[in-house]
Image (cartoon, rainbow, N blue to C red):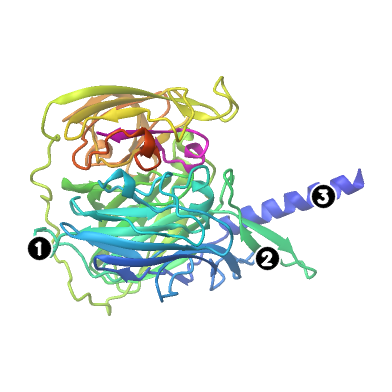
Amino acid sequence: MNSKFTLLTSFILVVCLSWQTAAHAQKFVNPLPIPYLMPGTNFNIDITSTNHNFDPNGFVDSVDLNVPIPTYCYNEVGNTGMTYLGPTLIFEKGKDMTFNIANKLDTMVNTTVHWHGLNIPAEEDGGPHQVINHNMTWSPSFPVIDPVQTVWYHSHLMNQTTDQVIRGMAGMIYVQDPTNDPLYTKLPRDYGVNDLPIIIQEKGFNFDTLSDGTIKAKSLIAGEKPGNGVYTLVNGVVGPVMRVPGQFVRLRILNGSPRKMFHIGISDELVNPTNFATIYMIATGGGYTDEVKFVNTQIMSIGDRREFVVDFGAYNNGDTVYMSNLYKSLPSDARYGNTPGNAIMAFVVDNSIQPTNPSTIIPIALDGNYGLAPGPVFKTRNKKLYGHPTGNGQGGVWTIDSIPMNMAVINDTVLVNTKERWVIDNTTSHAHPFHIHKVQFQVTKYEGTLGFPDGNGGITDQTGVWEWPNLPEELLGYKDVQLIRKNSIMTFEARFDSFPSPFDMQNLNTQGFMYHCHILTHEDTSMMHQFVSG
């Protein structure tokens, strides 16, 4: 009995220390890493195993995270600059991209590289079918036909997506069109200075207790059911700080977590902030919004990207401004574990930083052509999200239409160059971020519960029916991910243009585009289906 009590006490101590680590008085000390750029049209990339220090300057003081941890990463061939995540790829609209992507992981691990958010051929999509076996090279090629937007790339290996993204397989992509985009010269565009990639993730660590009592991190908590990651990272470090010019700065924010939403705002108050800067939302995952949206706080759903411009000229030189962590106000159905800490990262205003291409005025009108995608609706599809981790009649898995994912089954066939209407009914008691490959969709109707930021760091839920064009800002814009709250129904329209992939029983292993919940633990436990565009 005493032995069992001692083990239980030790376990509780470690858990409590881990929780205190994330919740301690925050002093942001780790400079924000900025992934290096890879421009061009021919990309030679290695996927490797390495080690990464998530806390090089000791932000966490109750345990030791200032140690090398085994990770995965992407790098340009010959470059070892990334030890976690990958470089930022620059794709130019209208250009043809070619790749040689080598799987050089030091264990017998297969993987894929999915181009999340792009309209490309199915065989180049990088979903579960396009496996890159260990010590093999994948060489996709495709034209960039998408508009200007911020997308990303990540592993999408069947039943192992959660594990591999946690270990570091993710990176950002900027789709640009310098020649034809009238906003290119008007918005902040100096990468790493006034145009910042911000990849937010959650992490958990395994620890060893040394003979001197030190609790030292030894590995990431990965696998397919990682539990609550109490540490919040940006670009691969905890406690990040970035020095920014005292003017307009563009934040391209990606929630690259496996299972957590984040509620964020910009404030000069660290603890219990109620005073938030008005920030300018200029883009959703599929590109520019019709006009600037003036917001105070936003919920960032998993897999989603949003672009914001922050006026740091409103602060004094030397001021510290925080990206607030407002997890306490997240609706309970959208909260997949608590995220301690008052802020996610800090910015220090430094007027000595002078961008080469400063922006002095942010245009209010952005996409003057924004409207519903043209053409009649050719077909309507109805999908239901089912399941609960305790079973609830679904065999212990999350599903779409009560049908588990089967790589050999094509669930839908879409006629290419047509517009469809999809009705997604979330029958569960949890919020799910619905994601579809190939297309950017537009929400046309939402029935159920939505959360509205109250301007003071809180979220006020409202239940109702919202229809195009009278939609709240949360639902506007082109999207490939949208959070659907519990017991709510979202209807969207999308054009499935370009790149037909005719049904071929002999070639099923290259055809499918996925649609799924982007909570990676749900995706890996069967809340995913596939379609072909023929």
Say which element carries label 1.
Answer: loop
Name the element at disc 2: strand
Quarter of the picture holding the N terminus? top right
Residue 203 locus on image (x, y percent): 54, 54
Task: Look at label 2 and name its amino acid.
Answer: Lys
Residue at image location 66% in from the left, 57% down from the top:
206
Q: Pick the residue in front: 492 or 430.
A: 492
Residue for badge 2: 216
What is the number of the mark on residue 7? 3
Label 3 secondary element = helix
Give the residue at x 20% y 34%. Answer: 416
Does label 2 or label 1 sit earlier along the sequence? 1
Which residues fall within the magenta stretch? 516-534
Residue at 63% over, 60% down: 219
Q: Nearer the viewer, residue 383 or 531?
A: 531
Q: In this rendering, which labeled residue sits more in front, label 2 or label 1? A: 1
Name the residue tied to disc 1.
179
Foreground: 476 or 312? Answer: 476
* Crowd rating for badge 3 (residues with CA inside 10 Å; few <14, some 14–19, many 20+): few
Query: Can residue 238 be seen at all in this image of the molecule?
Result: no
